[in-house]
Image (cartoon, rainbow, N blue to C red):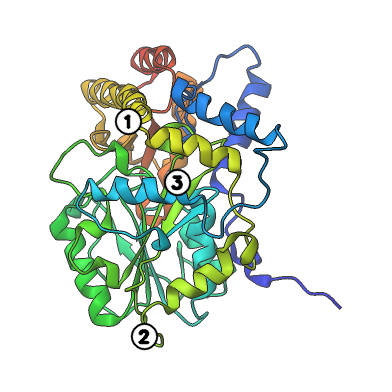
Amino acid sequence: MATLNKNYNKLQGAYLFLEITKRVNDFLKKNPNTEIMRLGIGDTTEPLTKTVVKGLLSAVKKLGNKKTYTGYGEAQGDIRLRSALSDFYKKRNIDLSVQEIFINDGAKGDCANIQSIFGVDNVVAIADPVYPVYVDSSVIAGRTGEFINGKYEGLVYMECNEKNNFIPVPPKQKVDIIYLCNPNNPTGSVATKEQLKTFVDYAIKNKAVIIFDVAYSEYISNPSLPKSIYEIEGAKKCAIEINSFSKWAGFTGVRLGWTVVPLDLVVEDGQKGKVHSLWSRRQGGSQGTMFNGASNIAQEGALAVLSPLGQEENKKLIAYYMDNAKLIKKSLTEIGLQVFGGENAPYIWIKTPYNLNSWEFFDKLLKEAHVVSTPGSGFGKEGEGYVRLSAFVDKKNVKKALESIKKNLKL
């Protein structure tokens, strides 16, 4: 008899964004003529740039011609793309070989799937609050106990709050896998080099592995803040970096990213290169076990992103979204709300007034101002008492939402 993975039963309620959709739809059923302004989910809204579209179209034309048609790609992704990414890192004085770069179909999948190459008895540490996939994938993999008082037994939570400016510190106890999201989703906070060095030192000492998710790194404008874990001395010995073209170049629907697994990375029961070889076995395209490689079309588009003109165009996209973030932060601060983030990341982290919990303030924003936010409690226990707003919105809608908040929200 087939049985099910009972770890799924531990997952708490509906996935965060499904619950948001349900509440919004319920509101619209009762108020069918109401215009909803969505500042919640972090999906990009601006179109792909001309250079990127040109790259995608060139790949489609190649597939439509017998002489240039290609099927399965290279094991770790198009060598041209991996070379371009290697050059991209070199501009930050980071030396990575093309062998250490794996092209994926988006960062989210790799953030979860990377756990499959590690033992089920590994202890996982996560920031709190943080992007839910790190927690949920740990639960599904069987690395946690039950959910009690807002936390899973067996997980180590690194608290992020106003006291530490929403930047976690390394655990006091020994853990094996550490998830870090930098810039942090949802708080918009960014760790300094000195703060990341404490994690690298901890990981090397304890032979732990840092899973470093930098999907929003291109939004960091402060030159003193690191955009890659490999800017920190020793990080190649202990860190895997996962990145994406989604939020940088609007690839949320195109689906493409990359994962760096250094050959120097060593874990407690392995030798140099072993982690890399296991990930290669799992993800090695048509030569791997569980992934046949990313779309040829998407990879051609990514090459266009990394071209000089593509980078220039996408910097303008980032500036557009960050202008939204600054506008949101300024406007909400002016009406008396306590606001964080929005400076080196496209998210604004708002403390709820009057000791309202996250869902209560979500409902208040929705019913009074007709604005959709994201409850902070959906990102972890430490997120309770906050909501997140996203800058990934058309500027006209941002201004309309802020005007509605200013006029209709009862504070």
Circle 1 — which element?
helix
As drawn, the label of residue 268 is 2
Cα distance between the residues tagged 2 and 3: 32 Å
Q: In front: 268, or 144?
A: 268
Kind of residue sitting beneath label 1: Pro
Task: Locate residue 33, reporting x and y percent.
Answer: 63, 11
149, above or below 347, in the image = below
Task: Locate residue 84, reporting x and y percent.
Answer: 38, 45
| Residue shown at the point (40%, 31%) measured from the top left | 390
Task: Locate residue 377, reporting x and y percent.
Answer: 43, 48
- The residue beneath circle 3 is 81
Tell how many labels: 3
Circle 3 packing at 10 Å, graded few (<14), some (14-19), many (20+), is many
As drawn, the label of residue 264 is none
Q: Quadrant of the C terminus?
A: top left
Of the two numbered discs 2 and 1 in the rendering, the one whose residue sits closer to the viewer? 1
| Residue shown at the point (19%, 52%) measured from the top left | 93
- The residue beneath circle 1 is 308
**Of callouts 3 and 1, which one flags the residue occurring earlier in the amino acid sequence?**
3
Query: Mark 3 and mark 2 in contact (Cβ < 8 Å)?
Result: no
Q: In front: 386, or 55?
A: 55
Cα distance between the residues tagged 3 and 1: 14 Å
**Of callouts 2 and 3, which one flags the residue occurring earlier in the amino acid sequence?**
3
**Of callouts 2 and 1, which one flags the residue occurring earlier in the amino acid sequence?**
2
